[in-house]
Amino acid sequence: MRAKTVRSTATDAASEGARRTFAIAGQVMSVPKAAPGLHLVATPIGNLGDITLRALETLAGVDIVACEDTRITHRLMERYVIAASLTPYHEHNAASARPKILEKLSQGLSVALVSDAGTPLISDPGFKLVREVCAAGHDVIALPGPSSVLAALSVAALPTDRFFFEGFLPPKQGARRARLSELARINATLVMFESGLRVQESLQDIALGMGERDAAICREMTKLHEDVRRATVSELATRADELETRGEFVLVIGPPPENSGEMSDAALDDLLRASLKHDSVKDAVAGAMEVSNRPRRDIYARALELAKEISGDD
């Protein structure tokens, strides 16, 4: 790459971009044309400074950038003065957009695939495109970089030697609880995405089956208002109404404890309190029985006491 001082006008920036350049730290960097093929480019999950030099070289060097939301990707291009040709590729237009991208690749052009944030194909569209590009005999090149999954794992203070990435939980409570019941049997740290609209409800449901496990709630990773909270799932669920629900969440749930025998009194209380906020006594008892290894009569008696405590009855 050759460096020279960046010029300030939009016209100059556009002409530099036409010659395959990007600007960083006041310098314009010239790059060669990217090799033909599909380039999977990881982009920042919040802080635009997390972009890699190789990603910038590729975004400036490809013929086309396929992205989920052109408005979001345009902000990244503006930051680094890249005059890229953007085309939308998302779950709603993927079926019609794939043949067009494949045609470009057959002409020997280079295409970068980016998601709105993070690594493409991780809870984002792209799998079918990669499969068809490979089937057509074109190169697929991965450019690793930011990932909210790995960022959350690194700060959660939970085991990372084995983890299971779930993505987003089902939005409806019945399906969500059924899926959580399956996930509870996995002997690994669990990583899940959740939206602010459902994070409180999901925490309550997770507490039903995994109340004693250590966990972390990671909100707005790498952004100005990043927030990481660590406690047991039950403790986090009881304080769920204190959460700022704006933004994106990654939930990290530790593996089952080695001693998964009878649940302690304190953990049972936390679990029942979390459940009784939105469930009947009957449902709360049924959920606690699945994970506590405690006699039903003991759980039921304690649930009745806590229900009176929560309602304020004497």
Image: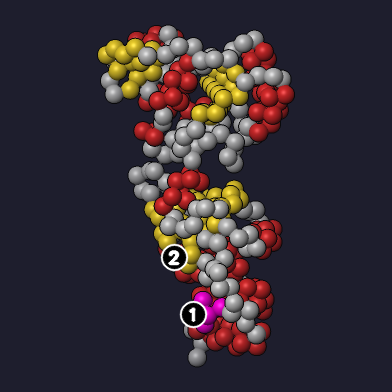
* Residue 265 sits inside the magenta stretch: yes
The answer to whether residue 283 shows anywhere in this view is no
Checking the image for residue 182, the label placed there is: none
What's the residue at 51%, 46% (across, down)?
A: 149
Checking the image for residue 266, the label placed there is: 1
What range is drawn magenta here?
263-267
Checking the image for residue 231, the label placed there is: 2
Query: Could you tell me which secondary element the residue under label 1 belongs to?
Result: helix
Q: Magenta part mainly helix, strand or loop?
A: helix
Q: Is residue 36 left or right of residue 2?
A: right
Q: Image height check: is 244 above or below 75?
A: below
What's the residue at 42%, 61% (across, down)?
A: 230
Q: Is residue 243 left or right of residue 278?
A: left
The answer to whether residue 282 shows anywhere in this view is yes
* Residue 8 sits inside the magenta stretch: no
Q: Residue type at mark 2?
A: Ala
Q: Is residue 221 left or right of residue 114?
A: left
